[in-house]
Image (cartoon, rainbow, N blue to C red):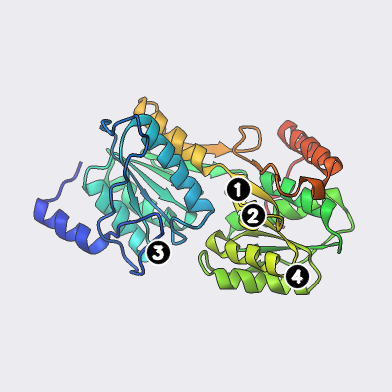
């Protein structure tokens, strides 16, 4: 493994990495030394020699979605296996490569890159550190030391769309995405297909895109535009921007559908359901495999069959959704698992 002198390491870290706290990233575009996470297991001391680090995308910890789910998996592994991880928030995409390289230089054996926006950085960095294992969420990076954690988002989104199509009162529903890339089109495509399966007459308004992952105001304004166009349900796949969608739904007395994490309680009664993407499970399983000497490179796909995606339990809205729709969702789920339904990956 490549090493640096102590002086260079200290200088590089002080300039390049930013400590990540539970409240999210600092306002700086680059990061300084990431703080060591405390071990909160109570009974399990941090005695493991596991050296694990995680670099979050621009949404950062506190997005109540994608990054928080990844962090939850890391926290679970810390508590169970007795180690303390490094966490790094990165405000500017140009700093991903620097942050990943700095962690590899400083002895981290397993480094996670959270989000497809880090794909190019992992492609550039991983070959330079063949003894370091990398895992990236949502990007199919091919390298001998990289595991790609991928999800069948379209399958979970189909179920979310089914709920929307069966529940809408106006006959119109909408979608707000982050950046208009193939990954997010999977969400929109599955959502539209599921809605039309539940109600062939439903109108799925053209999706709106914030072209950001962390602009909550953009999420709110896009959702309000869809509600003003007649939609009464809007599904989001927009990272932190989605919190703005939920706010708009609450203010306008409409429904939002959450994503990635269970967001049902973000605005109780205004979030119809959430399409949960178990990034936490993928992170935890990767750390466990590494600890057990079973880490393998290549794609690892999490889908409905493996319980990698699915819906929240709709604890605040079950009465609104109704048992007939819930039964329809379960049937659709089984038909997808069996292959009877093949879900499109584009709208």
Query: Disc 3 or disc 4, which is closer to the eye?
Result: 4
Split into 4 quadrants, where in the image is the C terminus?
bottom right
Q: CA distance from mark 2 to mark 4?
A: 16 Å
Marks 4,1: beta carbons within 8 A = no
Q: Examine the image and state in which quarter residue 108 appears.
A: top left
Marks 3,2: beta carbons within 8 A = no
Marks 1,2: beta carbons within 8 A = yes
Mark drawn on residue 227: 4
Q: CA distance from mark 4 to mark 1?
A: 22 Å
Mark drawn on residue 258: 2
Q: Earlier in the sequence, mark 3 or mark 4?
A: 3
**Mark 1 closeness class: few <14, some 14–19, many ≥20 residues within 10 Å:** many
SS assignment at label 3: helix
Query: Disc 3 or disc 2, which is closer to the eye?
Result: 2
SS assignment at label 2: strand
Marks 2,4: beta carbons within 8 A = no
Tell whether 276 sits left or right of 293.
right
Residue 68 in the image: state x and y as whole percent.
48, 50
Residue for badge 1: 262
Q: CA distance from mark 3 to mark 4?
A: 32 Å
Residue 167 in the image: state x and y as whole percent.
83, 53
Residue 103 in the image: state x and y as whole percent.
27, 49
Residue for badge 3: 93
Mark drawn on residue 292: none
SS assignment at label 4: helix
Q: Earlier in the sequence, mark 1 or mark 3?
A: 3
Q: Residue at x 84, y 49 (%)?
A: 198
**Mark 4 closeness class: few <14, some 14–19, many ≥20 residues within 10 Å:** many
């Amino acid at each position: 493994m490549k090493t640096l002198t102590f002086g260079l390491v200290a200088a590089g870290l002080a300039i390049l990495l930013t400590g990540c706290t539970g409240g999210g990233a600092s306002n700086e575009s680059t990061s300084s030394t990431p703080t060591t996470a405390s071990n909160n297991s109570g009974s399990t001391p941090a005695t493991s020699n596991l050296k694990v680090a995680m670099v979050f995308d621009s949404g950062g910890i506190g997005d109540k979605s994608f990054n928080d789910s990844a962090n939850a998996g890391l926290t679970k592994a810390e508590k169970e296996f007795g180690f303390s991880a490094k966490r790094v928030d990165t405000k500017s995409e140009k700093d991903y490569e620097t942050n990943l390289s700095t962690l590899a230089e400083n002895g981290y054996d397993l480094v996670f890159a959270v989000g497809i926006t880090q794909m190019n950085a992992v492609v550039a960095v991983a070959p330079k550190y063949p003894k370091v294992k990398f895992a990236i969420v949502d990007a199919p990076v091919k390298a001998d030391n990289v595991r790609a954690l991928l999800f069948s988002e379209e399958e979970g989104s189909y179920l979310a769309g089914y709920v929307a199509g069966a529940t809408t009162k106006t006959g119109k529903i909408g979608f707000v995405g982050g950046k208009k890339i193939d990954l997010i089109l999977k969400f929109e495509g599955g959502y539209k297909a599921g809605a039309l399966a539940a109600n062939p007459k439903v109108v799925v308004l053209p999706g709106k895109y914030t072209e950001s992952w962390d602009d909550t105001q953009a999420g709110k304004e896009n959702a309000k535009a869809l509600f003003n166009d007649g939609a009464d349900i809007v599904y989001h796949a927009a990272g932190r921007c989605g919190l703005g969608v939920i706010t708009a739904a609450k203010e306008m007395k409409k429904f939002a559908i959450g994503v990635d994490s269970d967001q049902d309680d973000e605005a109780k009664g205004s979030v119809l359901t959430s399409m949960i993407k178990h990034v936490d499970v993928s992170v935890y399983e990767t750390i466990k495999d590494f600890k057990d000497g079973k880490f393998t490179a290549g794609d690892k796909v999490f889908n409905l069959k493996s319980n990698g995606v699915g819906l929240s339990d709709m604890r605040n809205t079950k009465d609104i959704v109704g048992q007939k729709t819930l039964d329809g969702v379960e049937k659709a789920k089984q038909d997808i698992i069996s292959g009877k339904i093949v879900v499109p990956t584009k709208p």
